[in-house]
Structure formats: structure tokens, C-alpha cells
Image (cartoon, coloured by chain):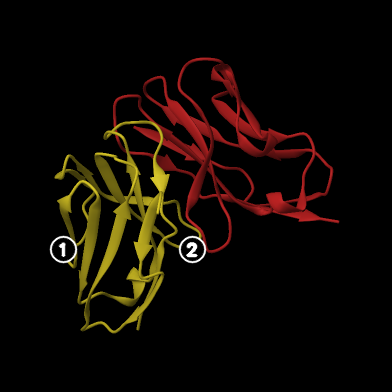
């Protein structure tokens, strides 16, 4: 398996649920990213991890909690989300943080009821 | 700080016609510029990138873009549209040594017979 994979592809959760999104990259990259894509809005960078350490957090609410156990895996833990958090969550990776080419996964479509 | 403006959220062209998707940027330093394509239910795929080398950049699927500093533009073109080009296209900018990509709001390209 190659590239960037994300699971699940679709997720429906209530506001009191706890769930996790998973991202895995098979490209040997050292930097990974979480983006949020909402309808009619530009992609928003949420988190950047380089060499498993978080290097950028764009003021994301604490109900989103990232975890990077190793350079191949990235999780986004979700708890007590709001309906406005419904969006497509995209994971990406690059050789290094700042490397111009980021490779994206297919995304997880999240619906919060 | 940097930003990207994509003029026209929807563009419709006939098959075989010229495709022109507009992107203007604002950046305090010489930027790196990117075009990504997103097909339905998929993540973003890099079409092409400008990283301060040749100003005319050729990408995949017959697309190309020209960096024009005087116009602060990086418009995407393709001489002849194909039905398979129907997708959403995103322009993005980032400073050379930073990890944060700033995306435009996207342009949805429709190709008609």
C-alpha cells in the first residue's frame, strides 16, 4: 500500500461522543499535517508535526487533540464536538516541514449531529 | 503574511475549449505557489508548483501556469478541456521556509459537451 491513507472515510457522531481519525503515510516522510475543509471556505491548517513533534497549532479548539506516535501515523482525537465542526478532514505529509510538496489523503467526511 | 484570491468560484467551459482559472496572491516575501486539484470524494492532488525557477511551470494532465510578479498572478491554463478535467481546483501560497500553505477558496470547473 502506498501514499497517504485515512480511516474512516465517513463518520457520524453525536456531540457527546469521542472518536478518533487515523492517518497513515507510506512515503517515508517526516512531517504530517491535519487540515479542515469546510464548504465554501479555504482549507484551514490545524496542526503540523515534524519528526513527531508538534511545530504548529493554528489556535485549534481543545476539543481537537492530535497525536503523532511515530512518523508514519497521525491521529486526531475528537470529543464534545459541535455541529459546526462538520467538515472534510484531510491529512497530508511531506518529506520535511516546509517541503513544498505535500501529499494528501482522501479525507474523512465528518458529520456532527 | 500571505493570501490567495481565486476569481470565480465556478467556471464552465466546453470540451476542447481553453481552460483559464485565475489566482492572485499577496505575499511579503517571494512566494512558492501551487495548484492542487480535488476530484469528487478524493483528497487534493498536486498539479504543479512554482518554486522560484522557471516562471512558466508545466504540470500533469496538460496544465500549466505562469508566475507573473508584476501582476501578482499565477493563473492555471490548459489549451483544450477534457471531460475528465471537471473537478475543484485550489491555488495555494507559502513562504519558502515555512510549512503553512495558505489556500484559496477554490474554483469548481465544469466541462460541457
Q: Is residue A56 left or right of residue B27?
A: left
Q: Position of residue A50 (x, y in %)?
A: 20, 40
Residue beneath disc 1 = A62
Mark closer to the chain start, 2 or 1 = 2
Q: As displayed, is residue A20 above or below residue A71?
A: below
Chain given the colour yellow: A
Mark 1 lies on a secondary structure that is: loop
Residue beneath disc 2 = A39
Q: As displayed, is residue B106 above or below residue A38?
A: above
Q: Residue at 57%, 36% (x, y): give it.
A: B23
The outermost residue toward the front is A1
Say which of B77 and A52 sits in front.
A52
Q: Quadrant of the C terminus of chain A?
A: bottom left
Say which of B10 and A73 sits in front.
A73
> Alpha carbon of mark 2 to alpha carbon of mark 1: how far?
22 Å
Which chain's residue wears label 1? A
Mark 2 lies on a secondary structure that is: loop
Amino acid at each position: 500500500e502506498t501514499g497517504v491513507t485515512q480511516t474512516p472515510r465517513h463518520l457520524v457522531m453525536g456531540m457527546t461522543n469521542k472518536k478518533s481519525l487515523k492517518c497513515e503515510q507510506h512515503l517515508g516522510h517526516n512531517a504530517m499535517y491535519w487540515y479542515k475543509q469546510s464548504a465554501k471556505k479555504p482549507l484551514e491548517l490545524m496542526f503540523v508535526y515534524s519528526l513527531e513533534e508538534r511545530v504548529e497549532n493554528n489556535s485549534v479548539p481543545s476539543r481537537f487533540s492530535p497525536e503523532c506516535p511515530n512518523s508514519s501515523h497521525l491521529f486526531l482525537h475528537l470529543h464534545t464536538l459541535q455541529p459546526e465542526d462538520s467538515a472534510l478532514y484531510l491529512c497530508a505529509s511531506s518529506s520535511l516541514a516546509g517541503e513544498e510538496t505535500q501529499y494528501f489523503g482522501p479525507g474523512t467526511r465528518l458529520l456532527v449531529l | 503574511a500571505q493570501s490567495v484570491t481565486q476569481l470565480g468560484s465556478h467556471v464552465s467551459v466546453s470540451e476542447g475549449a481553453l481552460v483559464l482559472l485565475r489566482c492572485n496572491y499577496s505575499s511579503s516575501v517571494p512566494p512558492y505557489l501551487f495548484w492542487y486539484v480535488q476530484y469528487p470524494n478524493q483528497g487534493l492532488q498536486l498539479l504543479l508548483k512554482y518554486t522560484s525557477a522557471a516562471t512558466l511551470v508545466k504540470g500533469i494532465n496538460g496544465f500549466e501556469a505562469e508566475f507573473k510578479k508584476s501582476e501578482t498572478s499565477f493563473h492555471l491554463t490548459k489549451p483544450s478541456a477534457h471531460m475528465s478535467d471537471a473537478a475543484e481546483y485550489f491555488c495555494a501560497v507559502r513562504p519558502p521556509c515555512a510549512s503553512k500553505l495558505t489556500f484559496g477558496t477554490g474554483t469548481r470547473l465544469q466541462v460541457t459537451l
